Amino acid sequence: GTGTGTGTGTGTGTATSAGSATVTAGGDSSSSTKTSPTPVEEGEEEEAEEDGKDTHFVSFEGDRSRVVVIDKKATVLRWLLGKAWQSWHNKVWAACQLTPICAVLGPVSIVTTLVAYTCFVRDKGLFLIPGITGVGLWYNMLTSRSPRVLRILAKDFDMLFNIGNMIVWACCLSASFGWDERTVPVVLAVMMNAFLMVLVDATCSDFEYGGSRRIFLSFTTLMCFSGLVLDQGGLYNDVENIVWVFNTRDGFHATTAEAWEATNSTALADDGNTITLHTYLRSVGNTRVLFFAVFIATAAWASIYHPTECAILKNAARRSVIGGAQEEEVVEVPSTAAGTVPHEGSQELQYSLSTYQAEQEDTEEAPVSQQLNDERMALDAESEATVNGLGDDDEVIAFMPAEEIIIPDGPKRSMLCFLLCGNHCVAKRVNDFAEEHKAWGGIPGFIGFIIFLVALTEVIPLNLTWVSVLLLPDTTRDFFKLNTHAVKLCISEPFDFMVPFATLTVGLIGGMASFDFHPGCCAGFICFDFFFITDILLSDADLTESVIREAGSNVPIYMIAFITFGSIYAMIVFGACPSASSQHQLSFTFFNSHVKISFISMWARFMYVSSTPRNFSRNK
């Protein structure tokens, strides 16, 4: 769902972001409040619809029943030292804080490594120097991480996906180097520091989470794109360009790019019953690092404009209707009032939680859902034990739910009303008629899309791909009723909207080019692009009352979309589309490399890029 920022800050997105705030015994805590238009009275609902006024509100709220609190000194360093060395903790902690020497040597070692890769170095043993000097930075960052938050991040797909991307990139680049000494700085300097950047929300260091976090994230983004340009441009010295080849006759084997191009093979060569596929190892690694670079760039953006917002750790928001035609049945949740944790050290934290909730609820203009009103801030069992053990001078870090927002919805808030320049009367009549007869568009659209996929294989005539236009009526109905305010919030998300939108569009252009811009295929790809944008990327912007009240889990629809993408991807790479020719290529010179990209390869790769992070990150 669309939600906003953190306990002490604000931000917008398709998921509420967990925020962290340091609470010290004897200190003060801060929070921010929300405002919203006045809701419509129940008795005025029919008149409001006729006048185009808001008929109901939709609340996007976080889970208040679980507030995570961690001891600021419960770091990986304390875990490594053990109980026998607790007296040494403060001394070692002070020594292992992010010191200037490590903060300087780490970035210098990474920059030196990238520059050295472009030069001819006779003694490869010299590459051990930047590898060793880069250890200090990530070791300092690792010792400041909280083991409990690391366990939480270990269940987060964004973290696992991007760490996996960097591992694949490091393996691909090391294989290109022949696994010589140049592999050491790749692993010790670049990859390990990249890992710790993904785990930045687990830090207990004020220095790192404060001003230096945005610097490190921005620097990591710059280095990722720099390494991508150097590698793709052929600027690395003494690198072997490896190609992986697979065919149904000889199986899998690896060769060099020169040997492969000498065979005058294509990306998909069908020799009777034999299908041959190939991919460049450099391309695989660069795709992985591109994923990581875009993700870190979005985290850097968030850390700059929302300093108190977690960059990586996010939780989904829940949506509830306030007002409307039906009153929502609410299951009361036992409240946890301030002071329920019986310990002197917890009083300030409980005061902070109660103050945060009071400011969230105490707004005269904004309506509050009954479920949210009944639910109080509460600590989980492990956090409660942490608070009970606090001393007078101890500090904790609290991860609290995001600030709730409330979005009004009604005839004048729809996309159709926006397109009609504010004519809410016509927009309401059209949307009501389309909603009443939605089966007329839904069933033909599903059948038309199945025929489109079968026609691509030419089991039936390729011209039947025109049937895909039957997908438009139902998709247009879904698009017309989207809430304009929620759409604005959705499209402002870089990783959840902009990246899938751009990559899918580029991929489908490659698909149309591979079919030599066949009119029926172009129509099918455009309809599918419109469907994916409306029903997947902008699904959270559908705020109609019936959709929210009857909504179940979104996992099935996202998995269906992912399976559809997987089926199309398999059809592409295994040559199930005879008219999709790999001879159509995009060729250009990039620094020292002559790049050739077949449009069918562009179609497959960019469709994979657009579907993978989106579907899995939304299923958490």
Image (cartoon, rainbow, N blue to C red):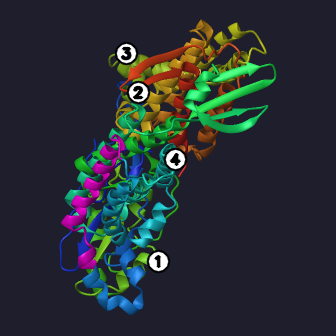
Is residue 116 on the magenta stretch?
yes
The residue lying at 50 percent from left, 38 percent from top is 240
Q: CA distance from mark 2 to mark 3?
A: 10 Å
**Dot 1 crowding, Cα within 10 Å, few <14, some 14–19, many 20+:** few
Q: CA distance from mark 3 to mark 1?
A: 53 Å
Image coordinates of residue 220 in percent, x first then y, are 32, 49
Side of 44 where 464 appears, left or right? right
Q: Are marks 4 and 2 in contact (CB under 8 Å)?
A: no
Which residue position holds label 4? 178
Q: CA distance from mark 4 to mark 2?
A: 58 Å
Which residue position holds label 3? 420
Kindly identify which numbered label has been placed on residue 414: 2
- In the picture, the quarter occupied by the N terminus is top left
Q: Identify residue type, mark 1.
A: Ala
> Which of pointers 4 and 2 lies earlier in the amino acid sequence?
4
> Which of pointers 3 and 1 lies earlier in the amino acid sequence?
1
> Which of pointers 2 and 3 lies earlier in the amino acid sequence?
2
The residue lying at 47 percent from left, 77 percent from top is 381
| Residue 538 visible to an observer of this rendering | no
Residue that protrudes farthest toward the front in the picture: 122
Image coordinates of residue 614 in percent, x first then y, are 50, 40
Is residue 257 on the magenta stretch?
no
Q: Depth-wise, is mark 3 or mark 1 nearer the camera?
A: 1
Q: CA distance from mark 1 to mark 2?
A: 44 Å
> Which of pointers 1 and 4 lies earlier in the amino acid sequence?
4
Q: Which residues are magenta?
A: 93-121
Q: Secondary structure at mark 1?
A: helix
Which residue position holds label 1? 381
